[in-house]
Image (spheres, rainbow, N blue to C red):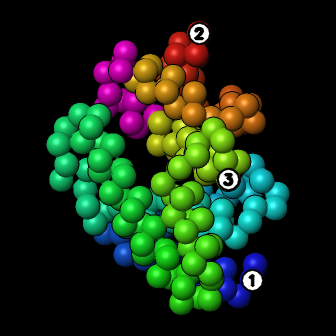
């Protein structure tokens, strides 16, 4: 890891660590957003043995300070959700750009990271696809079971199907090997049949 990459990752982790919501990890509390960011980076290392610095930063920053603007600050429904997500991406891109500038990255690199965080070019840009694959796989492995208990069955099936369509063939293969509860595995199987 280069010095400038390490500087940005450490700065991001400091911001992630400010998340007031904590979860228990092996008996120790950790900021929920920091744990998510760490899981994203770990998964990226599984999917891509030599990711570029911009991709590593974007993956680590994907949910940067989302807790500052909660989802319920926007209207219910798909349009409200998409607007919230877009605004979160813009805000995260601006914050990351500042951190990258301080570390000596070029304006081109900061723009690239913003593009990745906002997932512009999904399906056409391999780095955007890698970020999306990480997000989908981290969700399926770590958050899917709890989320699925809160969502109506048929709606959950549609969410799984939409998530699956966004993933690459490599991510599909990996997703089918993830440890899941029997209920979660049955939901995925039903959605994909």
**Nearer the observer, disc 2 or disc 1?**
1
Q: Residue furthest front?
A: 108
Q: Is residue 78 above or below residue 59?
A: above
Numbered disc 2: secondary structure: loop
Give x and y (percent) for residue 148.
40, 30
Range shown magenta? 145-155
Residue wearing tag 1:
2
Please give the name of the residue rendered at 75% of the width and 36% of the height, measured from the top-left corner: 170
On the image, the x and y values in percent for residue 71 come to 26, 50
- The image's mark for residue 127 is 3
Between circles 2 and 3, the one closer to the viewer is: 3
Left or right placement of residue 190 versus residue 20 in this view: right
Furthest residue toward top: 193
Q: Residue placed at 77% from the left, 53% from the top?
A: 48
**Do callouts 3 and 1 mark residues in contact (Cβ within 8 Å)?**
no
Residue 150 shown in magenta: yes
Which quarter of the figure is the N terminus placed in?
bottom right
User: Quick check: 11 above or below 117?
Assistant: below
Residue sitting at x 19%, y 48%: 74
Q: What residue does disc 2 label? A: 193
Tell me the distance, in whole angstroms, between the alpha carbons under discs 3 and 1: 19 Å
């Amino acid at each position: 890891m280069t010095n400038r990459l390490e500087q940005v990752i450490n700065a991001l982790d400091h911001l992630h660590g400010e998340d007031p919501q904590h979860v228990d990890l092996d008996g120790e509390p950790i900021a929920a957003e920091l744990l998510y960011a760490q899981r994203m980076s770990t998964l990226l290392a599984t999917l891509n043995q030599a990711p570029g610095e911009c991709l590593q930063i974007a993956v680590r920053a994907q949910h940067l300070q989302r807790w500052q603007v909660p989802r319920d600050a926007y209207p219910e429904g798909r349009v409200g959700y998409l607007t919230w997500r877009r605004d979160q991406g813009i805000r995260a891109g601006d914050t990351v750009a500042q951190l990258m500038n301080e570390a000596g990255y070029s304006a081109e690199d900061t723009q690239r990271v913003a593009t990745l965080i906002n997932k512009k070019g999904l399906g056409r840009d391999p780095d955007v696809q890698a970020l999306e694959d990480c997000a989908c796989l981290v969700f399926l492995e770590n958050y899917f079971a709890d989320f699925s208990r809160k969502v109506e069955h048929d709606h959950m099936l549609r969410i799984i199907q939409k998530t699956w369509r966004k993933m690459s063939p490599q991510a599909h293969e990996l997703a089918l090997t993830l440890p899941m509860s029997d209920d979660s595995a049955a939901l995925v199987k039903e959605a994909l049949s």
